[in-house]
Amino acid sequence: MMKFLLDSNLASCCAVAREAGIEAAHVRDHDLQHATDFMILEFVQQHAFVLVSEDTDFGELLARQCTVAPSLVLLRTYEPMTPDEQAAVLLANLPRLHDDLDQGAIVVIERSRLRVRRLPVLPPIPEQREQ
């Protein structure tokens, strides 16, 4: 079963996801509320979580790392949403995203649009040999 770690601004959404039967934790549950984005990504990868956030910096970090994990779900709402609305948008899309998230992806969920980008986003840079 896939498990999700929700970023600091999604605490109420986490509770709604749990009520819906999703294995979800909040960064505060793991004392990560003051951690850097890089530290959160390391934790998520080490503990096999999918990260859910509204922070686009995570996507940029994942692209630079050229890895296939961890997966990231970005909730991009351009107008305010209640925690129930955030959870509803997330939960409505999770079933169709399972394979992508399981294999490594950055998923952007908007109210009316869904984008999936498989990891790694950028190909690894080949090592240069000294001559």
Image: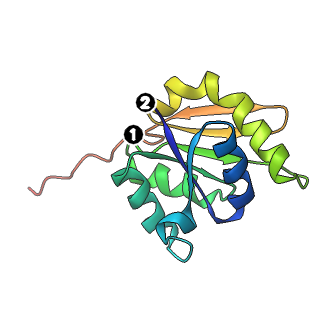
Q: Vertically, is 67 above or below 116?
A: below
Report the residue at 34% width, 44% height from top.
Answer: 124
User: Viewer-proximal residue, 43 or 122?
Assistant: 43
Disc 1 to disc 2: CB gap under 8 Å: yes
Binning the other alpha carbons within 10 Å of mark 2 as few (below 14), some (14 to 19) or many (20 upward) gives few
From the viewer's perspective, tell me whether residue 48 is left or right of residue 61. left
Q: Amino acid at mark 1?
A: Val
Q: Which residue is mark 2?
A: 103
**Mark 1 or mark 2: which is in front?**
2
From the viewer's perspective, tell me whether residue 31 is left or right of residue 82. left
Residue 84 % position (x, y): 82, 47
How many numbered marks does the figure carry?
2
> Which residue is most to the right?
79
Q: Which residue is mark 1?
A: 68
Residue 80 % position (x, y): 90, 55
Q: Secondary structure at mark 1?
A: loop
Point out which mark residue 36 bears: none
Report the residue at 69% width, 55% height from top.
Answer: 54
> Which residue is most to the bottom?
34
